[in-house]
Amino acid sequence: MNYAEIKQDLLRKQQDLEERLERIQRRIHHVDEKIEPDFAEQATQREDDEVVYKLSTTVKRQLSEVRRALGRLENGTYDVCASCGGRISIERLTAIPYTSLCMECASELNK
């Protein structure tokens, strides 16, 4: 895989995450599903809302990572490790296109 293919993959991922986030936001704000009048049902909806809110946080984080990767592609620093300044291998970028760390720095971080 080359950088042009990785960029297309990142752009598809960005679009998917943006669409997912929009659906989540609609769910959180009960745009398509109104709050139930029954108290027991409301409690269940609130529990569901907590799960959806946590999912929203995860999707926002992923979207931010993808956007940063696209920015690094644009400014020519895509394959530069944010920690050590070394090169991130094309194999690693193909596997995790939004990564900002080389394998060694990522391994150190996960210890």
Image (tube, rainbow, N blue to C red):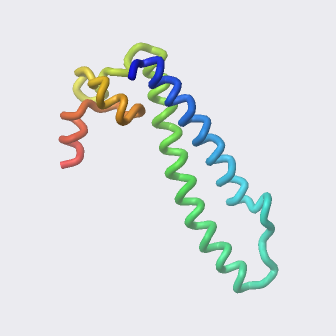
The quarter of the displayed image where residue 11 is located:
top right
Extreme-top residue of the structure: 76
Q: Nearer the viewer, residue 91 or 57?
A: 91
Determine whether 62 is above or below 41 in the image. Answer: above
What x and y, as percent, mark residue 93? 35, 29
What x and y, as percent, mark residue 65? 46, 36
Q: Nearer the viewer, residue 39 or 91?
A: 91
Q: Nearer the viewer, residue 52 or 96?
A: 96
Q: Residue at x 45, y 28 (%)?
A: 69
The quarter of the displayed image where residue 89 is located:
top left
Q: Residue at x 45, y 25 (%)?
A: 6
Determine whether 106 is above or below 38 in the image. Answer: above
Q: Nearer the viewer, residue 33 or 82?
A: 33
What x and y, as percent, mark residue 9? 50, 29
Residue 33 appears left or right of 10: right
What x and y, as percent, mark residue 51? 56, 65
Counting every numbered tag in the picture gives 0
The quarter of the displayed image where residue 52 is located:
bottom right
Determine whether 18 is above or below 82 in the image. Answer: below
Q: Residue at x 58, y 60 (%)?
A: 53
